Image: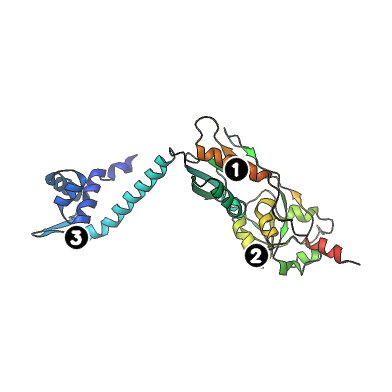
């Protein structure tokens, strides 16, 4: 690629960073295990390539020019990023380091409330969790384990479906007290995702009390359930959710279901993990734990829905 030729050689930049930190070619040479003249020549070559001086040579040492002071943070940040990226890459060879790429809402609402059990059971595993809003079609080159949301169709990828979710409305308890019918629901703000397979139209059309000839409701949209469910918790409206992201919030009383009606969710969460002798011990431990959690019954009973409460209170 042509733009690479415009970058100074890495050894010139390392000589500049070391010299700028020490304000001495001699000390920089000692740190880099080079001769002082070699460092000086690399600095001159860098200054020539950039077309401006980076140092002022004083009798008592070096002093950065304005250009040198401006350039130094960029070079330092670049080396820091390279060191961090190299550390992550080489760390994948460590059987105790686990990199997990997971859907953002799954990570927040399902994984986070349960992760303490994994960390307590496997204290030797160092977790690196990377989140994304939408699943990518191609496999991550660095993740040992991926949790993706989709229809189960990926090119050259095989995923293990974790469970079958259902989708339904949820809202804050105070909002649910105002909702006793579909007509009441339509007086509230409806919250949904900007891009999802199922929407409020699907749920409303499935409800026997919905008048399909009425004007379509206004729906406020977010890019992820992490945002739309936060809106619902704050009492801004009623969100369309599903078991994986809403069950813990329902169990803890942060959200309730104003209606019993739920629809099978077309999308699902899939586990994608490598198998065989090349799989790290940390990845094997996490995969085994995850499947145990999938089969684990909920620690708290689901709270009754608003219309179930109304039925129980009816004479």
Q: Earlier in the sequence, mark 1 or mark 3?
A: 3
Name the image quarter holding residue 88: top left
Mark 2 lies on residue: 233
For discs 2 and 1, the disc positioned in front in the rendered view: 1
Regarding residue 193, the answer to whether it shows in the image is yes
Q: Give the Cα separation between the discs numbered 2 and 1.
A: 30 Å
Q: Position of residue 1 (x, y in %)?
A: 35, 39
Q: Residues within 10 Å of mark 2 (few under 14, many from 20)?
A: many
Q: Residues within 10 Å of mark 1 (few under 14, many from 20)?
A: some
Name the image quarter holding residue 208: bottom right
The answer to whether 147 appears left or right of 12 in the picture is right
Q: Are marks 2 and 1 in contact (CB under 8 Å)?
A: no
View extreme (left): residue: 59
The answer to whether 271 appears left or right of 314 in the picture is left
Q: Secondary structure at mark 3?
A: loop
Q: Earlier in the sequence, mark 3 or mark 2?
A: 3
The answer to whether 297 appears left or right of 21 in the picture is right
In this view, the residue in front, 211 or 140, is 140
Mark 3 lies on residue: 65
Q: Are marks 3 and 2 in contact (CB under 8 Å)?
A: no
Regarding residue 139, the answer to whether it shows in the image is no
In this view, the residue in front, 121 or 300, is 121
């Amino acid at each position: 690629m042509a733009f690479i030729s415009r970058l100074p050689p890495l050894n010139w930049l390392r000589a500049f960073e070391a010299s700028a930190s020490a304000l001495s070619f001699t000390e920089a040479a000692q740190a880099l295990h080079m001769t002082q003249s070699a460092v000086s020549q690399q600095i001159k070559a860098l200054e020539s390539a950039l077309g401006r001086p980076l140092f002022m040579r004083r009798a008592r040492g070096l002093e950065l020019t304005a250009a040198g002071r401006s350039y130094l943070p960029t070079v330092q940040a670049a080396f820091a990023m390279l060191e961090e990226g190299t550390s992550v890459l080489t760390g994948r060879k460590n059987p105790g380091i686990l990199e997990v790429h997971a859907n953002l809402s799954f990570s927040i609402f399902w994984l986070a409330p349960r992760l303490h059990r994994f960390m307590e059971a496997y204290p030797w595993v160092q977790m690196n969790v990377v989140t994304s809003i939408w699943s990518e079609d191609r496999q991550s080159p660095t993740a040992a384990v991926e949790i993706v949301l989709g229809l189960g169709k990926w090119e050259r990828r095989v995923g293990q479906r974790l469970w079958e979710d259902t989708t339904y409305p949820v809202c804050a308890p105070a909002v649910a007290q105002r909702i006793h019918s579909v007509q009441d629901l339509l007086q509230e703000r409806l919250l949904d995702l900007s891009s999802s397979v199922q929407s409020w139209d699907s749920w409303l059309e499935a409800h026997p009390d919905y008048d399909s000839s009425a004007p379509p409701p206004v729906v406020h949209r977010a890019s992820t359930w992490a945002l739309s469910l936060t809106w619902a918790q704050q009492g801004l409206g009623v969100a369309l959710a599903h078991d994986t992201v809403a069950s813990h919030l329902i169990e803890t009383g942060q959200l309730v279901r104003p209606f019993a009606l739920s629809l099978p969710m077309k999308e699902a969460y899939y586990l994608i993990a490598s198998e065989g002798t090349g799989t790290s011990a940390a990845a094997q431990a996490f995969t085994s734990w995850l499947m145990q959690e999938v089969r684990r019954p909920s620690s708290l009973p689901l709270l009754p829905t608003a219309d179930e409460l109304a039925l129980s209170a009816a004479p």
